[in-house]
Image: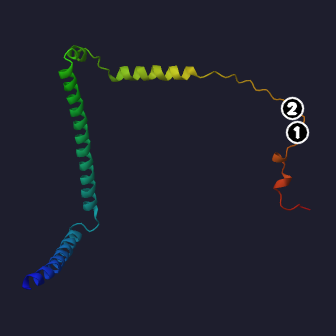
Amino acid sequence: MNLSMLLQVQPALVDSTTKAKIAVNSEKFSQIDPFGVGLTFIGMFVVFMSLLILYLMFMSITKLLALRIKKRKLIQQPELKEKIAKEPVFTGEVNAAICLAVGLYLDEIHDKESAVLTINRVAKTYSPWSSKIYGLRQYPR
């Protein structure tokens, strides 16, 4: 009986002491940083550091996976070692030249249309679509 009563009282006691500590700590923090500028910078720092850590983790994972795949290919086919050593390395200038050539090629694929316009008169010039009288609600008299 005594144990069950203690288990019932304990969550209320923990809850009240936790709330009291939170209240005291919030008062101390509001005295140190009344406008919340420090908290803002701390929050931004935490977010950007976590993003940086995630970025580094993803970059290292992709590099490790690529290295693992390359090693597996070398183990399976040893003659690829010579081919991999002779693979060309494309620099930024080479990539830019390839992109420029592809862009120029795609621009020249389209037809060059002539800018000659012909205007023919039609026999029936009236069309109810362009008539303004159907747009008026009342006749102005």
Q: Which of 35 and 14 is in front in this view?
A: 14
Q: Which of 61 and 44 is in front in this view?
A: 61
Q: Residues within 10 Å of mark 1 (few under 14, many from 20)?
A: few
Farthest bottom residue in view: 1
Give left or right: position of 1 versus 105: left
Would you place residue 125 above or below residue 76 in this image? below
Q: Where is residue 85 in the image (x, y as percent from the top left)?
A: 22, 16
Point 25% across, 35% down: residue: 62
Choose top left, top right, bottom left or bottom right for residue 18.
Answer: bottom left
Residue 71 is marked as: none
Q: Where is residue 92 in the image (x, y as percent from the top left)?
A: 34, 24
Give left or right: position of 75 versus 104: left
Q: Which amino acid does label 2 sit on?
A: Arg
Give left or right: position of 2 versus 61: left
Choose top left, top right, bottom left or bottom right for residue 110.
Answer: top right
Q: Position of residue 57 (x, y in %)?
A: 22, 41
Marks 2 and 1: in contact by CB < 8 Å? Answer: yes
Point 36% across, 19% down: residue: 94
Give the structural element (helix, strand or loop) at label 1.
Answer: loop
Point 18% across, 71% down: residue: 25
Q: Which amino acid does label 1 sit on?
A: Thr
Locate the N terminus by quadrant.
bottom left
Locate the C terminus by quadrant.
bottom right
